[in-house]
Image: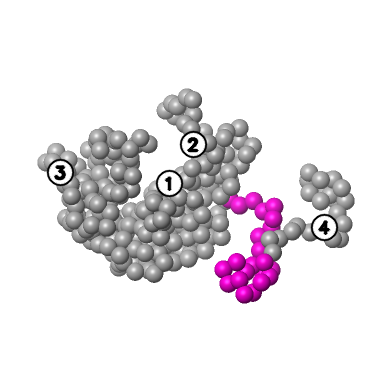
Amino acid sequence: MSIYLIGKTVFELTQKRPEDKRKRQRNDDSSDIEGYLGPWGKFVDEKTVMKPNEDVGINLKSDEPPEKCFLPKKLIHTWTGHTKGVATIKWFPRSGHLILSCGMDSKLKIWEVYNDRRLVRTYSGHKQAVRDACFNNSGTEFLSCAYDRFCKFWDTETGECKARFTSKKVPYCIRFNPDEDKQHLFVAGTSDKKIICWDIRSGEIVHEYDRHLGAVNALEFVDQNRRFVSTSDDKSMRIWEWGIPVDFKYIADPSMHFMPAIKLSPNGKWLACQSMDNKICILMY
């Protein structure tokens, strides 16, 4: 049996009229180069994937931590869609209502965390496995890096690849500069022992940090984003001043193993490091 809706929407049962159309944002002034929309303006009531749902029973806009925090105890959901393994998963900034997965099938996918937990969008453009990704502060754009030796800059909403960058070496990790006035800059750790900083606006290399003796595996900004930490296959950790291509602190020990992942604690005092001797090392910054 088929059911036909004659209302405006499933929530409005009044009958449609010929003039009932969704209103678009308008700016037909062709002299306004930056703001001109023409017939392509978004719908006034259009909902974007970046806007968190308001019916999940959680205030996703709050900056306050939950009253109770605990370690996960059971599997809630499994997202399936990649045809090969997943290298990295990133939370959508601030709200965390979406996750971005980097697949070994050369694709990136965005998924819902709440409600139907559906696949929202697939980003295709890399030719080999995707190694890492990073959202900008607002989540409107993100960077990805892959074994095809390219870093790509994406529009989260439309799926458009807006720019691509390459040093002809494999990028293993990638990070935006978190400062609002430096969101046009990003760093990538590469297989040729370098950390390269690009300017998205010009597509040019701004800095090269070249002191490691092995491939660079992980990057993390610290000290209110004035510095960043890097780890490498050379089993060392180095701390750099932003914009100064000489490390001011070198951490190494014969007992250290290389660390493919590092993360700063929310209070900025500790670094959690995944060590390849099956340990998680906590370092005081």
Pointers 4 and 2 in contact (C-beta within 8 Å)? no
| Residue 183 part of the magenta-drawn span | no
Residue at label 3? 252
Residue at label 4? 20
Is label 4 in a helix, a strand or a loop?
loop
Magenta span of residues: 27-49
Q: Can you give x and y, in whole percent of width and height, for residue 253 in the image?
A: 13, 41
Is label 2 in a helix, a strand or a loop?
loop
Mark 4 burial class by Cα count in 10 Å: few <14, some 14-19, many 20+: few
Q: Can you give x and y, in whole percent of width and height, for residue 85 in the image?
A: 41, 49
**Of the image marks 3 and 2, the number of the one nearer the N terminus:** 2
Q: Residue furthest top?
A: 68
Q: Is 139 left, or right, of 280 in this rendering?
A: right
Residue at label 2? 63
Instruction: Name the mark on residue 195.
Output: none
Instruction: Name the mark on residue 89.
Output: 1
Q: Is 152 left, or right, of 76 in this rendering?
A: left
